[in-house]
Amino acid sequence: MSNDDKGLNDLFGRYRTACPDVEAGPRFMPGLWERIDKRRDFWFTFQNLARAAMTASAAICLLFLLLNLLTGPQTRLLPPTYADALAADHTAEKIYYTEAVRSSNDERERAPQ
Amino acid sequence: MLVEPGLIENARAGDHGAFNRIVLAYRRRILGTISRLIGRPEDVEDVAQEVFVRLYDSLDQLRSAELFEPWLYRLTVNASYDYLRRARRRSESLMADLSEQQVLAADSLAGSKQQTQEREKARIRDFVNELFGHVTEQDRLLLTLKEVEGLSLKELEKIYRVSENALKVRLFRARQRVLKAYNVAVANGRLP
């Protein structure tokens, strides 16, 4: 071990002596329980809020479900089955197919001489 | 262990009286360790309270009563680390001024033997704190636990849950950095 190492070890030893063994004051235990209670109160409030939010969302879900069930099938946004969806879809009947008709004259005009 | 495993089990089950007895049994040891870890006697009690609050919160996560002491040391190291990080964030110059003011205030007092000794101790603490400023807060804590608290590598392994070899490497590097800063201070004649 070098002299520097010995010097540093000696310094650490002196530091240990220089850091006093702190005695807890008379307010240590009451202060500790105050902190514990404060933190517990915070979690209690947080849990209550979370529980209230959960209940509110569950109630909203139930409300929407009931509304959906109570309204008639014609007013529902989506048809109940795929077959109903196909039957309700009339878009194919409204499409008009057109074919491109080219006159033979036009073709002759474009043909190379 | 300073308490019976049954007492820890009772505290885990929510017995406040058992928790109180655990705090009373370990209070002195934890206060001493924190004092050496952070090097600022005025804040020791506050950090110790934080340790026991965290213990109260996390006692149900303790797997076995036998692991209680390393667990408590781990909480102590974590709370001290948080304190040191907060302290470092404060202005360095402000801390230096404060320290100087403390020294001046101490100088202005009548120079009794006890006061001279207290002044000397404060100088040593300030000097070692300055040396520890050359390593990270984690390394400072590790080095203090090994070199000042005198914990063995096996004990450190349990606290940090890291292999002995990894700890050795980390300790060696941290010590080299502190030693370098120490040599510079010695060369400048600043050894207290």
Image (cartoon, coloured by chain):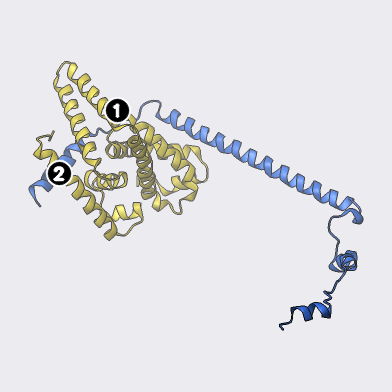
Chain colours: A blue, B yellow
In this image, B187 relative to A27: left or right?
A: left
Query: Can residue A18 be seen at all in this image of the molecule?
Result: no
Query: Can residue B77 be seen at all in this image of the molecule?
Result: yes
At which x and y percent is residue B26? 36, 40
**Tag shown at residue A24:** none
Assess disc 1: are there few (<14), some (14-19) or many (≥20) residues with their C-alpha within 10 Å of its C-alpha: few
At which x and y percent is residue B113? 13, 22
At which x and y percent is residue A78? 84, 58
B167 is higher (above) or lower (below) than B87: below
Tell me what residue is drawn at x 47 percent, y 46 percent: B59
Closest to the observer, B112 or B20 = B112
Residue type of the residue flagged with mark 1: Leu
**Tag shown at residue B94:** 1
Assess disc 2: are there few (<14), some (14-19) or many (≥20) residues with their C-alpha within 10 Å of its C-alpha: some
Please state the chain letter of the residue tagged with numbered disc 2 in the rendered image. Answer: A
In this image, B120 relative to A92: left or right?
A: left
Q: Which residue is mark 2?
A: A8
In this image, B150 relative to A65: left or right?
A: left
In this image, B187 relative to B28: left or right?
A: left
Question: Residue furthest toward the front?
Answer: A113
Please state the chain letter of the residue tagged with numbered disc 1 in the rendered image. Answer: B
- Secondary structure, mark 2, is helix
Tell me what residue is drawn at x 35 percent, y 30 percent: A24
